[in-house]
């Protein structure tokens, strides 16, 4: 499936971005007037309005070509939420979305750097490195940023993985945010994002996040994750305003419906 393109700056869009989610409730009224209300999850829709200014000729061409390939609203594509966290269940490491090596244990939740209690105590009881990861169906050619908050009573190091790219980062007595930005195999259709602990290490971990850009933004808690497959353009027309030589403005609306 096609994936919405990044700009030449490795950003997925420009600010401001408007994101709107609509939910639907099913109401059943019985003969005696009583009402039963249920959330209709499949009826939920999410819409993003992306406004671009100062686009170069090449960036404009990339967006125009992608719009044409999708046939406007005809064909679905994968859209990576520029306002959220691509990882699923970022505040719950016990969920099946996380792949954990067999000798790695997680306990919690414990206190986090935001004065909440959404961090996890992670221990490697093995004689070699152990880790946890998620593999996302996203193109390897894009630039991503993996970030996570770390703390350890006994100073140690942790390895962040983004596809084949790895980075060793320190973990000390105070909370610190570690980041890794990279792209991976250009032909890859999925990317593994992981956090590995050396043998015998124990750390507190909070706020794992993946974003389709080169630098981290504020942490966003996620449950379903920010990879939206079968999103579509809302409109069938592509309108562009040229403001100067090699400078263009475009507004695009992306729609995702749970039931499609």
Image (tube, rainbow, N blue to C red):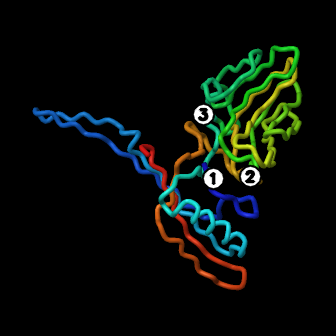
160 vs 203: above or below: below
Q: For the residues carrying marks 3 and 1, which lies nearer the camera in this image?
A: 1
- Mark 2 and mark 1 lie on one chain; the one further toward the N terminus is 1
Does dot 3 land on a helix, a strand or a loop?
A: loop
Residue 148: image location, x then y, percent:
74, 38
Can you identify the residue that label 3 sits on? Answer: 89
Residue 135: image location, x then y, percent:
69, 35
Q: Which mark is residue 142?
A: 2
Q: For the residues carrying marks 2 and 1, which lies nearer the camera in this image?
A: 1
Mark 2 touches mark 1? (CB < 8 Å): yes
Q: Residues within 10 Å of mark 3 (few under 14, many from 20)?
A: many
Residue 64: image location, x then y, percent:
61, 69
Residue 86: image location, x then y, percent:
64, 43
- Say which quarter of the image contains residue 176: top right
Q: For the residues carrying marks 3 and 2, which lies nearer the camera in this image?
A: 2
Can you identify the residue that label 1 sits on? Answer: 3
The residue depicted at 56 percent of the width and 46 percent of the height is 228
- Left or right: residue 30 versus residue 251 is left
């Amino acid at each position: 499936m096609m994936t919405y393109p990044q700009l030449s700056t490795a950003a997925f869009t420009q600010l401001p971005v408007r994101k709107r989610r609509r939910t639907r409730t099913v109401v059943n009224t019985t003969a005696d007037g009583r009402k039963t209300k249920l959330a209709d999850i499949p009826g939920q829709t999410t819409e993003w309005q992306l406004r671009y200014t100062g686009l170069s000729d090449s960036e404009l061409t990339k967006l125009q070509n992608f719009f044409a390939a999708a046939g406007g609203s005809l064909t679905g594509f994968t859209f990576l939420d520029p306002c959220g966290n691509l990882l699923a269940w970022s505040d719950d490491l016990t969920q099946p979305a996380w792949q954990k090596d067999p000798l790695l244990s997680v306990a919690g939740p414990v206190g986090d750097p935001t004065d909440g209690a959404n961090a996890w105590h992670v221990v490697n009881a093995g004689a070699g490195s152990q880790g946890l990861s998620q593999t996302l169906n996203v193109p390897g050619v894009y630039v991503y940023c993996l970030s996570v908050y770390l703390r350890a009573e006994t100073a140690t190091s942790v390895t962040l993985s983004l596809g084949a790219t790895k980075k060793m980062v320190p973990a000390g007595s105070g909370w610190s945010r570690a980041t890794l930005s990279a792209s991976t195999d250009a032909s890859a259709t999925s990317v593994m994002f992981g956090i590995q602990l050396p043998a015998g290490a124990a750390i507190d971990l909070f706020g794992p996040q993946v974003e389709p850009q080169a630098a981290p933004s504020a942490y966003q808690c996620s449950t379903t994750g920010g990879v939206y497959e079968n999103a579509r353009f809302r409109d069938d027309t592509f309108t562009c305003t040229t403001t100067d030589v090699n400078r263009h403005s475009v507004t695009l609306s992306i729609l995702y419906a749970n039931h499609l």
